[in-house]
Amino acid sequence: MGDAMAMITPLKRVRGLGSAHEGPQHFMKQRLTAVANLILIPFAVGLIATLAGQDLATVKATLANPVVAIALVALVLVMTMHMRIGMQVIIEDYVHEEGAKMMTLAANTFFSWAVAAVAIFAVLKLSFGG
Amino acid sequence: MAEASSEQPARARPLSPHLQIYRLQINMVMSILHRITGAALYFGTLLFAWWLFAAATSPDYFAFVNGLFATWPGMVIVVGYTWALIHHMLGGLRHFVWDTGTGFDIASVDLLSWATIVLSVLLTAGLWYFIAVEKGWVMPWQ
C-alpha cells in the first residue's frame, strides 16, 4: 500500500482521500469480513458435514447449543455483508448506465438484507426450540 | 474530457487488447474463477437460507427440502456450493499474501494460483469422501 500512496499529493495524503472522495473503507471492510470468514466458513463447512441429510430433531438439537447458534448468526451477518460489498464491485464494473446501476445496487442491498433476515430468524427460532 | 468541441466524428481510438486476445494463464483463470465463485456463492446463500427457513417452518417442509437436496441435481449443487466456498476462501488467502506486497514474482504467482485450484478440488473431494463415509453411503473397508 505504501507505493500506491506515493501517487497521492501531500495534501490528499493528509486528508486521506483520493480522487474518489472516499478512503479505503470499502477495501478494509472486504478484508475484515474475509478474516472473520476464515474462522466462520470452516465452521460452516463442518456444520454442513454434520447436518447433511439429518432429520429435524438432530438439526434442532445441534442449533440449541448457544455456541453453534451464535456462530451461525455471526456467519450470516459477516457473510451477507461480505457478499453485498463484493457484488457491489461486480455491479460497478459491469453496469454503467446510471439508473440501472442505482436500481441494481439497491436490489443488491435488499437481497443481502433479506437473506440475512430470513436466516437469522430461522436460526433463532430453531435455537430457541420452535 | 467531454468538452471536446469538434464537428468531426470522434476518430476510432486504439483499444487495448481484451480477454479473447490473451493466452489463458493460470493467475488470470483463478482471478476469473474468484469472481464467478463469489457470484455463485451470493446466490447460493439463498439455498442456505431456504434450508434454515424450511427447518424453522415445519417437519414436513424440512423433509421436502432435504429430499430435494438429496436428489442428483441437488447433490451436484450442494457439492458445487462447498467447492465454490473452499475455492473462494483459498483465493482470499492468496489475496492476503499479495496484500502484504509479497509473492508478485512469476514463479510465486503461478505457484499460488495452481495451489488454489488443486487444493480446492482436493479439499472438496476429501470433505465429501469424509461425509459419505460418516453417513455410511460409502464403506471403504468392505
Image (cartoon, helix red, strand yellow):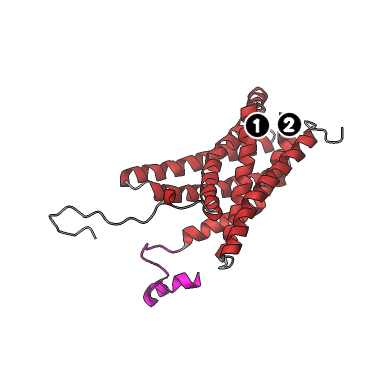
Chain part drawn in magenta: A1-23
The kind of residue on which mark 2 rests is: Gln
CA gap between label 1 and label 2 equals 14 Å
The kind of residue on which mark 1 rests is: Met
Identify the residue at horizontal 61%, vertical 48% (top origin).
B87
- Tell me where residue A14 appears, x and y as whole percent: 41, 75
Identify the residue at horizontal 83%, vertical 36% (top origin).
B140
Q: Chain of mark 1?
A: B
Residue designated by label 1: B75
**Along the viewing direction, whichever of A111 and A6 lies nearer the viewer:** A6
Horizontal arrangement in the rendering, residue B119 relative to residue B49 (left or right): right
- Tell me where residue B103 appears, x and y as whole percent: 59, 65
So how many labels did they put on this image? 2
Q: Quadrant of residue B108?
A: bottom right
Asked whether residue A21 is drawn in magenta, I would say yes
Above-or-below relation of B131 to A87: above
Residue designated by label 2: A54
